[in-house]
Image (cartoon, helix red, strand yellow):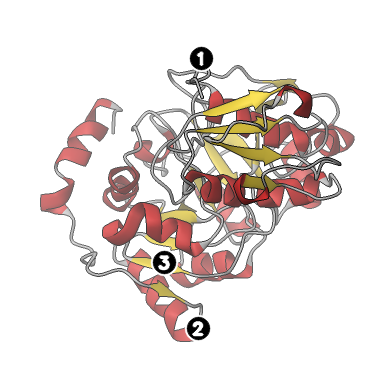
Amino acid sequence: MRLMSLNDLAKRLSSRFAGPAAGPMRISHPSRGVMRKAASVIKSGGIVAFPTETVYGLGADAFNPLAVARIFEAKGRPLFDPLIVHIADLSQMARLAISIDRRAGRLAGRFWPGPLTMVLPKNDLVPDIVTAGLDTVAVRMPDHLIARDLIMGSGTPIAAPSANRFGYISPTKAAHVLDQLGDRVDMIIDGGDCAVGVESTIIKLTGEKSVILRPGGVPVEEIEAVIGPVERGVETAKGPEAPGQLPSHYSPSIPVYLAGSIREIDFSRKDAGFLLFRKPDFTIPENRTEILSSDGDLKEAAANLFSSLHRLDKMNVRVIMAEAVPEQGLGLAIMDRLRRAAWKETAMPED
């Protein structure tokens, strides 16, 4: 299948799809019966929102191009943006990738299951719609029992981006999925809040160089401790090699302005909401402020980032003013998301 045919596939989707009808949507808790039903939905070509340790994913059978096309349709996601394929055990790798070198083996041994995605040379069995026509495939093993149970019950790797409207804030609660996608999804499995709270780190391992395509839940410093120095990929608005490389992404519906420090934030503005790294030692408008971590813990800040942005986006404010966090460890991933959320805006609106 050539990339041009993917557009035709999406256009013919509504008439050719034979999976379950969407119907009224409700959130389901992960009982045994619910998990069996969710696996059945995946097997029959449906799409299911499910929790991982990073964010909620919107999954389909990775080897069913019609089902995967429904993900793009539900999210409004462009077909040039590749997906991550989730696995439950290493035995599923052979169906996805044709080459797994020592770096990949070392990283899998150290960080899987966990928030690390590896981009590897793909097996031709993987449909082009999953990889946006690239000769690579992005693979990870989630550190969440519900996610792995769904994959095992479905009997197939599951292609899954974040379960949100394309470009909007990623979901870390089942309610976020319901708010954004509603009955576009066949099922939503509620597994509670996501523990990591930012998407996986993505590393490309197809040549001699190891390249970070997206910072995320595994700090770059920890990766380098396992395989040595890594390079940073270049963000692009055309032909991304992995999810999350577009300059504008993870955005609320109201403008985000990223301040270099808390001293640059004007707390006197009555039309602003505030996103702060830690609790300051002066008075702030608490009813319009979200604090990522009271004592400045980067792990806690990452876990709270998207939920805080969701709450601010529902407030009666015209702008969100965000404080920068230290760019070390998980702070690199937090700042990546904040910069992409703020990327479109060039001028601060007047109070």
Q: How much space separates mark 3 and mark 1, taking CA atoms?
A: 38 Å
Instruction: Quarter of the image for the N terminus: give it.
Output: top left
Residue type beneath disc 3 = Ile
Q: Secondary structure at mark 2?
A: loop
Task: Residue 31: give its label.
Answer: 2
Neighbour tally class for label 2: few under 14, some 14-19, many 20 plus, Cα within 10 Å: few
Residue type beneath disc 2 = Ser
- Mark 1, residue position: 347
Instruction: Work out whether mark 2 precedes mark 1 in sequence or the reverse, and give the earlier one.
Output: 2
Instruction: Work out whether mark 2 precedes mark 3 in sequence or the reverse, and give the earlier one.
Output: 2
Q: Position of residue 179 (x, y in %)?
A: 39, 57
Q: Position of residue 299 (x, y in %)?
A: 78, 48
Q: Residue furthest toward the left? A: 15
- Mark 3, residue position: 188
Q: Position of residue 156 (x, y in %)?
A: 46, 61
Which one is nearer the viewer's eye here, 80 or 315?
315
Q: How much space separates mark 2 and mark 1, taking CA atoms?
A: 49 Å
Q: Is residue 31 visible?
A: yes
Q: Is residue 115 visible?
A: no
Which one is nearer the viewer's eye here, 187 or 104?
187
Residue drawn where x is 42% and y is 37% of the image: 253
Neighbour tally class for label 1: few under 14, some 14-19, many 20 plus, Cα within 10 Å: few
Residue type beneath disc 1 = Ala
Instruction: Work out whether mark 3 precedes mark 1 in sequence or the reverse, and give the earlier one.
Output: 3
Q: Secondary structure at mark 3?
A: strand
Which one is nearer the viewer's eye here, 142 or 207?
142
